[in-house]
Amino acid sequence: RVWEKLIEKKTGKPILDDGKEVTASKEFIAETESGKIELEFTLNSTALAGKTIVVFEDMYNDKIKIATHSEIDDKEQSIFIPKIGTKLTEKDSGEKEMHAFEDINLTDEIGYENLLVGAKYFVKGRVINKKTGETIAEAEREFSPEKESGLLKLDFALNAGKLNGASLVCFEEIYSTDGEGKPAKLVAEHKDINDESQSVKIIKKELTKTGDSTGTIFYILGLAIAAIAVVTIKYRKFR
């Protein structure tokens, strides 16, 4: 029988799911001197973003331990779970609010953790109208991290002329890539529609208000009438 459990690399403690250690075991009969067997783990991984998990194994013959493999730094025994967070702003000013000009440029700064150094990844981003759910702009790019944690940027160009008062949010996904550099498997995403860091606001266009022109018109007419009266009086006086 082979028995395995999941360990968090940073703490060296077992991974818990609903308060219990995550383990798996399997009985088998060896048909050859060397071979492979597979075990599966079932757990809720939502709280494991950004963590590295290491699998420890023990092998038993009846109740006697005959082999063990518990090397915390062994990458072949490790599972790397990435984590990302983002900040969306106007590209040039870094502001979170902007006026509804025809064309604006946004930059999404993506912070990532626990990616494999030198591996090729593909990142996709979508700018979405919070109220309607409509995708306003999209961007994507390949990248290869030089460190496990770092920053990368996605730029978006969009027409904001009809987005008066709209709140926009950016959703991001990071994929591993296949041999041709195309997206293969989703490894991390950030899609919190209420995250202010992921959001920007398009300020409503306000029409310039002018004062009541009625009084001005009567004032101008009054001056004109007075001028005519003066001319008439002077003309009669010297006639």
Image: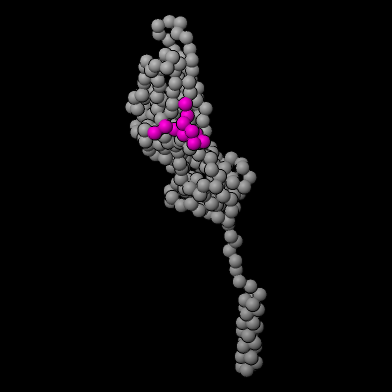
Say above or below: 117 vs 26.
below
Residue at x-position 43% and y-position 28%? 6
* Residue 143 at least partly seen: no
Q: Position of residue 159 (x, y in %)?
A: 56, 45
Q: Residue furthest bottom?
A: 237
* Residue 135 at least partly seen: yes
Which residue is at the front of the view, 234 or 239? 234
Q: Position of residue 214 (x, y in %)?
A: 66, 75
Number of numbered discs visible in the structure rendering? 0
Q: Position of residue 228 (x, y in %)?
A: 64, 84
Say left or right for 170 vs 228. left
Q: Quadrant of the N terminus?
A: top left
Say above or below: 112 vs 177.
below
The colour scheme used to paint the residues is one colour
Q: Quadrant of residue 135?
A: top right
Q: Position of residue 89 (x, y in %)?
A: 47, 48
Say above or below: 25 vs 88.
above
Say above or below: 161 vs 191.
below
Residue at x-position 44% and y-position 21%? 3
Which residue is at the front of the view, 91 or 122? 122
Is 182 in the magenta? no
Residue at x-position 46% and y-position 42%? 86
Is 22 in the magenta? yes
Which residue is at the front of the view, 3 or 156? 3
**Which stretch appears magenta?**
13-23
Q: Quadrant of the C terminus?
A: bottom right
Which residue is at the front of the view, 230 or 69? 69
Residue at x-position 48% and y-position 51%? 96
Q: Residue furthest front?
A: 63
